[in-house]
């Protein structure tokens, strides 16, 4: 919901990476993993799912926060199209459970929209690819997506088939999803988390200060880890310095 710069100023009022928690029981391992990514306060909801508690005590369900994102996207779409948007087709990762899919539908409904369909994102890419192409011979493609939260692949066959009904034969493109694979913990967010841990461990080892309870300081380290990841994507080395004068914290590693 917010960028990392905002999170350093308001760590308990900033809710990032919330899609990890939609439709997930509060006791699940995903909630523990989320605690390594964000300083936000998570609490158990009446439905045994996860809600977020702000510094003023108010609580927001994951679906409510995602609904805010859908509302914003709805406003953008309406401003471009010049007309109201009411019905949507939304893509989701192939590994989503039924509970996670239901959470997406709930968020869409809260945003005042109606779900026509949920489509696996690899399938959506395949359909978009096939719309402007013809296939004289069957072709098999791998759609590869290395995203922030996961890595996923979709194996797809494209072919041109002829209708067998009455009347003049017609040809149409057939998209057949053969298989899909994924790793839910490999991606940009996991790289951020590992760099963050290296920075924090090195800092505490050098300065003998336990800063793990200081949420604002920890948010600064998360921001720095994200910056380092960007630099290291094109370089072999990077230099890092983290300062938090508001908490009188010495320079970081």
Image: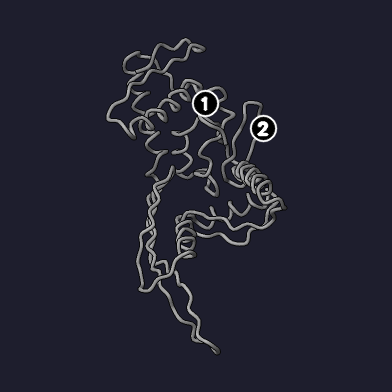
Mark 2 in CB contact with mark 1 (< 8 angstroms)? no
Please indicate whether residue 89 sits to the left or right of residue 121 in the image.
Answer: right
Residue extending furthest left? Answer: 236
Q: Which residue lies under the disc numbered 1? A: 5
Task: Measure the alpha-carbon separation of dots 2 and 1.
Answer: 22 Å
The chosen color scheme is: one colour
Of mark 2 and mark 1, the one earlier in the sequence is: 1
SS for callout 1: helix
Please indicate whether residue 243 sits to the left or right of residue 111 in the image.
Answer: left
Which sits in the foreground, 61 or 151? 151
Residue 52 in percent (x, y) is at: 59, 36
Rendered view: 146 above or below 7? below
Rendered view: 219 above or below 183? above
Indicate which disc residue 58 carries.
Answer: 2
Rendered view: 211 above or below 233? above
Residue 71 in percent (x, y) is at: 66, 45
Q: Quadrant of residue 204?
A: top left
Indicate which disc residue 62 carries.
Answer: none
Rendered view: 136 above or below 18? below
SS for callout 2: loop
Residue drawn at (57%, 24%) of the image: 10
Residue drawn at (32%, 25%) of the image: 238
Residue 49 in percent (x, y) is at: 57, 45
Which sits in the foreground, 83 or 122? 83
């Amino acid at each position: 919901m917010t960028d990392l710069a905002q999170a350093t100023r308001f760590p308990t009022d900033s809710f990032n990476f919330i899609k990890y928690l939609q439709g997930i029981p509060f006791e699940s391992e995903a909630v523990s993993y989320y605690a390594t990514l964000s300083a936000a306060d998570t609490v158990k909801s009446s439905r045994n799912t996860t809600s977020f508690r702000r510094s003023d005590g108010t609580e927001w369900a994951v679906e409510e926060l995602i609904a805010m994102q859908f509302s914003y996207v709805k406003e953008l779409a309406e401003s471009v199209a010049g007309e109201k948007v009411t019905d949507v087709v939304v893509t989701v990762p192939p590994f989503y459970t039924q509970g996670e899919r239901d959470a997406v539908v709930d968020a869409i409904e809260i945003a005042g929209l109606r779900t026509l369909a949920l489509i696996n994102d690899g399938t959506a890419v395949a359909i978009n690819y096939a719309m402007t192409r013809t296939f004289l011979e069957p072709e098999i493609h791998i759609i590869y997506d290395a995203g922030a939260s996961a890595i996923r692949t979709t194996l797809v066959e494209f072919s041109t088939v002829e209708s067998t009904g009455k009347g003049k034969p017609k040809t149409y493109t057939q998209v057949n999803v053969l298989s899909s694979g994924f790793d839910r913990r490999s991606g940009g967010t996991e790289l951020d988390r590992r760099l963050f841990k290296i920075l924090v461990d090195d800092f505490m080892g050098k300065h003998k200060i336990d800063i793990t309870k200081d949420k604002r300081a920890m948010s600064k380290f998360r921001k720095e880890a994200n910056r380092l990841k960007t630099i290291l994507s094109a370089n072999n080395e990077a230099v890092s310095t983290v300062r938090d004068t508001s908490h009188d914290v010495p320079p970081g590693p």
